[in-house]
Image (cartoon, grey):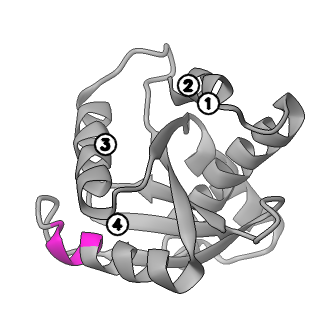
């Protein structure tokens, strides 16, 4: 049993999965697409990864604005979450992803990754940060009861 974390962008989806004990998140790949609205192959690849890693839940980063308002990207992310739920029948929890890309960039800078190479890693690392934040919160608040999960969604 694992949880999958996703960082949904206009042309990429960063993917991370938890370890079986639900303690740590590991980045596994970045799914790329040529056009923003072309999601069929993206969803198919996510399904393959769900089966490969025995995923039972999905955490999807919600890109709210810094003032906590919701813009067009939030709407598109929720639509993507709805498609994931319909296609996989797995629960999707939304997780506030503000500043995850900034944190991912900072992490790569500290690790000495060259600027030219950072773009190819940032979405995967952002997915790790989204999932790790969720796992840490879950660990710190108990066993992740349904009422707690509801409070994490928004």
Q: Residue at x 44, y 27 (%)?
A: 64
**Magenta range:** 39-43
Q: CA distance from mark 1 to mark 3?
A: 22 Å
Q: CA distance from mark 2 to mark 1?
A: 6 Å
Q: Main secondary structure of the magenta part?
A: helix
**Labels 2 & 1 near each other (Cβ < 8 A):** yes
Q: Residue at x 22, y 42 (%)?
A: 79
Badge 4: residue crowd in 10 Å (few <14, some 14–19, many ≥20): some
Horizontal side of 89 relative to 141 (left or right) equals left
Kindly identify which residue carries mark 3: 77
Q: Which mark is residue 12?
A: 4
- Whole-percent x and y of residue 44? 26, 77
Front residue of 116/92: it is 92
Q: Is residue 136 visible?
A: yes
Which mark is in front, 1 or 3?
1
Kindly identify which residue carries mark 1: 146
Kindly identify which residue carries mark 2: 150
Asked if 151 appears above or below 74 in the picture, the reply is above
Q: Earlier in the sequence, mark 3 or mark 2?
A: 3
- Whole-percent x and y of residue 114? 66, 77
Q: Earlier in the sequence, mark 3 or mark 4?
A: 4
Q: Residue at x 51, y 68 (%)?
A: 15
Which mark is in front, 2 or 1?
1
Q: Quadrant of residue 100?
A: top right
Q: Secondary structure at mark 1?
A: helix
């Amino acid at each position: 049993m694992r949880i999958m974390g996703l960082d949904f962008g206009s042309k990429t989806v960063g993917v991370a999965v938890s370890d079986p004990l639900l303690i740590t998140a590991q980045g596994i790949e970045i799914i790329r697409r040529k056009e923003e609205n072309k999601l069929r192959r993206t969803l198919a690849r996510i399904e393959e990864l769900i089966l490969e890693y025995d995923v039972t839940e999905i955490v999807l980063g919600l890109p709210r604005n810094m003032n906590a308002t919701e813009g067009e990207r939030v709407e598109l992310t929720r639509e993507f979450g709805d498609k994931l739920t319909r296609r996989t029948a797995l629960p999707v929890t939304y997780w506030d992803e503000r500043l995850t890309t900034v944190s991912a960039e900072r992490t790569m800078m500290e690790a000495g990754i060259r600027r030219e190479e950072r773009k190819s890693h940032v979405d995967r690392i952002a997915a790790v940060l989204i999932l790790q934040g969720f796992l840490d919160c879950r660990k710190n608040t108990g066993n992740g009861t349904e009422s707690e999960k509801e409070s994490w969604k928004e």
